[in-house]
């Protein structure tokens, strides 16, 4: 029997209790072939399913931070295996790869920075994430810093232009 | 007649007085003699005990009787927050120097202080709170209950003459609300019955598997004068130091000797039974790789995490040691899982939880310290020393090679996150590991903070680790206080998240300040319910994840200044944002502790995981709703 959430692992007790039944019954979808697949399939499915995880698109730094964090949580990987997992995830779930469909199409208003957003902010997720909430200038700054870290190919200069654009069009009052 | 018999048993009136009394009550002489005969064995130990001072009749108000019974149980500390009704209890302590009153300023804090004390002293935590404040205590009692920690919680209940009248603070059947989280609950119906009820409650609390018990004493009974026998609690102490069935031990020993690829999992019952040494000896004897419980569900580290045999948390399919054929579980509720192709032997202190969920091939109930010692002896008697050495040597080497590389990988990860402001948890872990004394008691009430654990070492002759299994937050600062009370000669560091701090952290600072508890409190402040967000987003994959809108977990705005909050409670504190300044801050905290003062560090920590960059929260302003500026 395959359960997505490990009952041996004590944290599962909390997870099971706090998760809706539907989430507990999730199964990890088939993983694309490629070097490192078996490592991910073996080491990453012992505590939780990968459904949501595989909706993420990010570059190697982003994936490395996740894999490293999981190692501290108890995922059993050797250094070469961890590297393989990062490589596999960044290749198969990296920017531009089969980007999950946005839930709603968002038309960007005109303005300086629109093109930068239209090009750089759609390679990992839809623009619906951007339009989902009005954010304060400092919130946009911290989101953009994070996107850079996750692999958004924007320079710091571009970042400021994008921030101004987002603030003008998706800023909190 | 009942009274007469009770007097005979309790107070030891003479056999002759009993018989003449019974005759006067209409019992035939023959029957009275026969009754006296049959009661004799019960009466005589009581008499003997009385002669030794183990029993003494006391006359006083219900409050006095309660306190005298606590005293006869060796209770040194009463953790409390008062109400009007329980005044007779505190009246009784005015001249009772053997019991110290420790005040907490909220019932959750009171309970968690008692819980921390109980975990480290092995004695029951004794709590008195207002009946109206009981629900505050209950949140923390869940931790106590789930982790099998002995505790007595008492309230002064409404006077019987008022019950059911729907008084302003009265709610009916209060004791039943405690049913799911206590081993036993009772109302002491008469003043004379208070000592007996208290004894019984303490007996239930302290007989393993331990847990919290609750007694309600109607306030009129606390005020009523009565005579009752106060008896030493030791006369009601039941030893549960039971050894497992020796045939089962032989079977287990045989299975372990013959195992091709065994695994040992360890849990909190080892800590409760003080069986760490025996379990270590067993692991060493056969070179067993050892897995612990994962981050939730466990509250102690019963196996030295620095040992080369220690793998980390138990997983369903462990890459190392690979497919196992014998799984020995000692004392863990959550690592007791059947694995395909492996025989499961489980030795547990708690029979209700043994084989409760998973099929177990060989289930043994025992004090796990004694049971493990038996297992070691049986293995030694069944195989010659050099055979055992051969079995162990190769496994030990392989396991050590594995744990060495895992350790190096983890340290490498920590190094890569060394710099960075806000500070990474991994850096904080590094500094704590290098600065804390080995005899430190490390109290942790953490969520994402638990990812520091594998970067530090606990157990054996290294730091003592205590936490809560259920992770019901608001426990840490109070438990740190209780830990220091139980072990004043060891450094105590308590660490918790900003979320946890706000659940119950500030109030115990008051107690730390008043009672001069030299504890270092570390708040790792990521201005977020960081891990809660990680779980909500990752595991549910719902709308918040899909749209990247964190509806619930961001705690910034206001950005709480915990160092300043500490000062308001009389505790010095400072904020640490620069990773290179952690060391200095820890040194100042240590200095303050040496001087007898508590100290708080508010450490500015990075959020991590999914959505870490977001500072969004759904806004609402009440001020903006006004039509009048009032
Ligand atoms: C009393 C209580 N209420 C609610 C929860 C649910 N919960 C689990 S973790 C958490 C947030 C913890 O935040 P923090 O202490 O800051 O830890 P972080 O994940 O940020 O390290 C909450 C609210 C709980 N465990 N206990
Ligand atoms: Mg936090």
Image: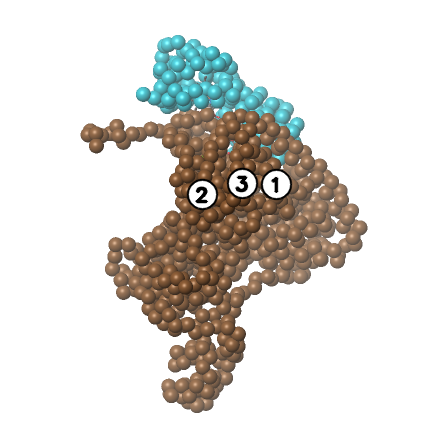
Spot occupied by residue B577 in the image (x, y as percentages of width and height) = 49, 29
| A89 lies left or right of A140 | right
Which of pointers 3 and 1 lies earlier in the amino acid sequence?
Answer: 1
Which circle, 3 or 1, is nearer the viewer? 3
* Rendered image quadrant of residue B320: top right
Residue position for label 3: B591
Which of pointers 2 and 3 lies earlier in the amino acid sequence?
Answer: 2
Residue position for label 1: B457
Chain colored cyan: A
Chain colored brown: B
Spot occupied by residue B271 in the image (x, y as percentages of width and height) = 58, 51
| B609 lies left or right of B457 | left
Spot occupied by residue B571 in the image (x, y as percentages of width and height) = 44, 41
- Separation (CA) of disc 2 from disc 3: 28 Å
| B571 lies left or right of A31 | left
Image quarter (top left, top right, bottom left or bottom right) of the C terminus of chain A: top left
Say which residue appears at 59% left-offset and 55% top-offset.
B273
For mark 1, does the 10 Å Cα neighbourhood hold few (<14), some (14 to 19), or many (20 or more) residues? Answer: many
Q: Does the residue labelled 2 lie within 8 Å of ligand 1?
A: yes
Q: Is residue B12 visible?
A: yes
């Amino acid at each position: 029997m395959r359960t997505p959430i490990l009952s041996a692992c004590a944290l599962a007790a909390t997870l099971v209790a706090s998760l809706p039944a539907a989430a507990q019954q999730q199964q990890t979808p088939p993983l694309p072939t490629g070097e490192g697949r078996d490592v991910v399939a073996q080491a990453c499915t012992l505590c939780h399913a990968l459904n949501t995880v595989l909706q993420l698109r990010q570059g190697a730094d982003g994936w490395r931070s996740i894999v490293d964090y999981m190692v501290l949580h108890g995922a059993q990987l050797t250094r070469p295996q961890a590297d393989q997992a990062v490589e596999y995830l960044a290749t198969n779930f990296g920017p531009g790869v089969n980007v999950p469909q946005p839930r709603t199409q968002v038309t960007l208003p005109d303005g300086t920075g629109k093109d930068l957003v239209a090009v750089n902010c759609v390679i990992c997720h839809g623009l619906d994430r951007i339009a989902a909430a009005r954010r304060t200038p400092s919130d946009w700054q911290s989101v953009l810093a994070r996107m850079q870290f996750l692999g958004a190919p924007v320079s710091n200069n571009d970042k400021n232009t994008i921030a101004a654009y987002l603030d003008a069009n998706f800023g909190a009052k | 007649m009942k009274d007469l018999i009770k007097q005979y048993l309790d107070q030891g009136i003479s056999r002759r007085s009993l018989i003449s009394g019974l005759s006067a009550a209409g019992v035939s002489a023959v029957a009275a003699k026969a009754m006296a005969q049959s009661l004799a064995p019960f009466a005589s130990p009581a008499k003997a005990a009385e002669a030794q001072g183990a029993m003494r009749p006391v006359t006083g108000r219900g409050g006095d009787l309660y306190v005298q019974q606590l005293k006869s149980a060796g209770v040194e500390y009463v953790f409390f927050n008062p109400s009007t009704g329980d005044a007779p209890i505190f009246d009784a302590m005015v001249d009772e120097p053997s019991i110290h009153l420790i005040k907490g300023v909220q019932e959750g804090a009171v309970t968690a202080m008692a819980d921390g004390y109980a975990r480290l002293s092995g004695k029951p935590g004794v709590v008195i709170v207002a009946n109206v404040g009981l629900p505050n205590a209950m949140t923390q009692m869940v931790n106590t209950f789930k982790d099998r920690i002995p505790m007595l919680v008492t309230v002064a209940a409404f006077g019987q003459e008022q019950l059911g009248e729907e008084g302003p603070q009265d709610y009916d059947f209060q004791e039943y609300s405690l049913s799911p989280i206590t081993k036993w609950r009772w109302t002491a119906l008469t003043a004379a019955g208070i000592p007996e009820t208290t004894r019984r409650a303490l007996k239930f609390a302290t007989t393993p598997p331990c847990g919290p018990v609750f007694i309600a004493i109607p306030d009129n009974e606390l005020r009523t004068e009565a005579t009752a026998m106060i008896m030493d609690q030791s006369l009601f102490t039941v030893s549960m130091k039971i050894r497992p069935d020796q045939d089962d031990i032989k079977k287990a020993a045989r299975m372990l000797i013959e195992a091709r690829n065994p695994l040992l999992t360890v849990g909190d019952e080892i800590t409760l039974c003080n069986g760490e040494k025996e379990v270590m000896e067993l692991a060493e004897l056969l070179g067993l790789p050892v897995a612990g419980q994962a981050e939730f569900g466990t509250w102690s580290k019963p196996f030295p995490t620095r040992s080369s045999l220690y793998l980390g948390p138990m997983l369903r399919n462990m890459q190392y040691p690979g497919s196992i054929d014998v799984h020995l579980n000692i004392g863990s509720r959550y690592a007791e899982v059947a694995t395909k192709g492996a025989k499961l032997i489980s030795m547990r202190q708690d029979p209700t939880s043994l084989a409760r969920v998973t099929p177990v091939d060989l289930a043994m109930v025992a004090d796990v310290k004694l049971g493990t010692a038996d297992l070691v002896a049986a293995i030694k008697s069944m195989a010659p020393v050099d055979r055992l050495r051969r079995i162990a040597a190769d496994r030990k080497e392989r396991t050590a090679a594995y744990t060495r590389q895992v350790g190096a990988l983890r340290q490498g990860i920590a190094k890569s996150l060394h710099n960075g402001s806000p500070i990474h948890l991994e850096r904080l872990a590094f500094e704590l590991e290098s600065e804390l004394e080995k005899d430190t008691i490390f109290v942790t009430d953490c969520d994402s903070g638990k990812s520091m654990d594998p970067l530090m070492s606990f157990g054996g002759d290294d730091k003592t680790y205590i936490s809560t299994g259920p992770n019901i937050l608001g426990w840490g600062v109070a438990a740190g206080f209780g830990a220091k009370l139980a072990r004043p000669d060891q450094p105590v560091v308590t660490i918790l998240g900003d979320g946890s701090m706000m659940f119950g952290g500030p109030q115990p600072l008051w107690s730390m300040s008043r009672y001069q508890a030299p504890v270092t409190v570390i708040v790792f402040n990521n201005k977020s319910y960081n891990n809660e967000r990680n779980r909500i987003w990752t595991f549910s994959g719902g709308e918040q994840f899909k749209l990247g809108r964190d509806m619930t977990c961001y705690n910034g705005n206001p950005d709480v200044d915990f160092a300043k909050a500490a000062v308001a409670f009389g505790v010095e504190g400072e904020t640490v944002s620069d990773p290179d300044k952690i060391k200095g801050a820890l040194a100042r905290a240590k200095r303050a502790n040496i001087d007898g003062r508590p100290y708080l560090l508010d450490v500015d920590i990075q959020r991590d995981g999914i959505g870490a960059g977001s500072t969004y929260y759904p806004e609402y302003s009440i001020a903006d709703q006004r039509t009048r500026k009032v």
